[in-house]
Amino acid sequence: MSLQYAILLFIVLLASTTMRNEAIPGGWTPIKNINDPHVTEIANYAVTEHDKKTGLNLKLEKVISGETKVVNGIIYCLNISASDSNKHNIAVLERQQFRKLTSFAPLK
Ligand SMILES: *[C@@H]1O[C@H](CO)[C@@H](O)[C@H](O)[C@H]1NC(C)=O
């Protein structure tokens, strides 16, 4: 087996393992301590980002519930209530110092 072939095989195996991990259902873990300052920080980040995008001036009221999932970083999926007295479901990807709001939707 040539070295190039071995390297290629390794990359293919690595890629398929990564994809398999992401596809595993039930990979979500409920957040037990919903008052964790870091969870509040993530929720505040989501509301602030949403405000920037929409020009609204919402504030976080509280985090109701949430789940996390590890995928080359952590996805936080949170149910929050905001100052518009509506409930929202938000998702934030956090990878080291990097954060991205990936979803901000009404929760019925
Ligand atoms: C958000 O609330 C809905 C409705 O109560 C629930 O089905 C869902 O599991 C909650 N999601 C999270 C991330 O807590």
Image (spheres, helix red, strand yellow):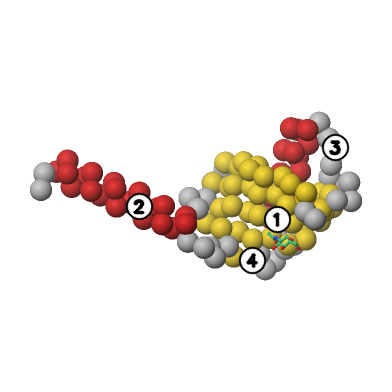
Quadrant of image for the C terminus? bottom right
Q: Which residue is located at x 47 percent, y 55 percent?
A: 22
Mark 4 or 1, nearer chain start? 4
**CA–CA distance between discs 4 and 2?**
27 Å
* 58 sits left or right of 65 in the view: right
Q: Secondary structure at mark 2?
A: helix
**CA–CA distance between discs 2 and 3?**
43 Å
Q: Secondary structure at mark 3?
A: loop
Label 3: few (<14), some (14–19) or many (≥20) C-alpha neighbours in 10 Å: few
* Ligand 1 closer than 8 Å to label 1 CB: yes
**Is the residue under label 2 in contact with that under label 4 (CB below 8 Å)?**
no
Q: Nearer the viewer, residue 3 or 98?
A: 3
Mark 4 or 3, nearer chain start? 4
The amino acid sitting under disc 3 is: Asn
* Ligand 1 closer than 8 Å to label 4 CB: yes
Q: Please indicate, yes or no, whether residue 40 appears anywhere in the rendered image.
A: no
Residue 76, x across and y down, in percent: 63, 54
The amino acid sitting under disc 4 is: Pro
Q: Quadrant of residue 78?
A: bottom right
Q: Nearer the viewer, residue 30 or 26?
A: 26
**Comparing labels 4 and 2, the label whose residue is closer to the camera:** 2
Residue 24, x across and y down, in percent: 47, 61
Quadrant of the image where one finds ligand 1: bottom right
Q: State the residue position of label 4.
A: 30
